[in-house]
Amino acid sequence: MHYLLFYELSSDYISRRAEFREAHLKQAWKASDCGELVLGGALADPIDGAVLLFRGGSAEAAERFARADPYVTSGIVKRWYVREWTTVVGDTATNPIRPQAVAAKVSGPANTV
């Protein structure tokens, strides 16, 4: 399953993040290297949030990440929450669903008489 970790950032995030960025990135790359964190980054224009995509059997990895993240513990993330994401399209979708026309092409031509 996929899980999205959403961060809502404080108004002083930009001015304060440098102090915590190295520790945050170290934790993020460790989670990525072990296969839990797939992608992560800040939202742009405006920079008021961030989204991190986790893969696993439950939301536990994403929740554990957030609870230990220096951005969260320092208060520059003012709120976080995790949502399960049902992915259906793409090479790494956990529940791939193809339209019937595409599924027929993938499985081969139908027998015709």
Image (cartoon, rainbow, N blue to C red):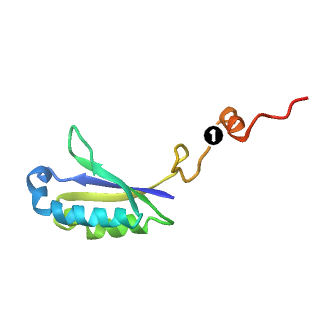
Residue 61 relative to residue 93: left or right: left
Query: For residue 104, what is the image quadrant?
Result: top right
Q: Nearer the viewer, residue 57 or 39?
A: 39
In the figure, 44 relative to 40: above or below?
Answer: above
Residue visible at 29% across and 69% down in the picture:
67
**Picture coordinates of residue 50 (x, y %)?**
28, 50
| Furthest residue toward left | 15
In the figure, 5 relative to 96: above or below?
Answer: below
Secondary structure, mark 1, is loop
Residue type indicated by callout 1 = Arg
The answer to whether any part of residue 51 appears in the image is: no
Residue 74 relative to residue 90: left or right: left
Q: How many badges with numbers are in the image?
A: 1
* Residue hosting label 1: 98
In the figure, 23 relative to 109: above or below?
Answer: below
Q: Residues within 10 Å of mark 1 (few under 14, many from 20)?
A: few
**Picture coordinates of residue 36 (x, y %)?**
41, 64
**Picture coordinates of residue 1 (x, y %)?**
51, 58
Q: Quadrant of the C terminus?
A: top right
Residue visible at 28% across and 54% down in the picture:
7
**Picture coordinates of residue 85 (x, y %)?**
48, 52
Q: Nearer the viewer, residue 53 or 72?
A: 53
Query: For residue 20, what is the image quadrant?
Result: bottom left
Residue visible at 87% across and 30% down in the picture:
112
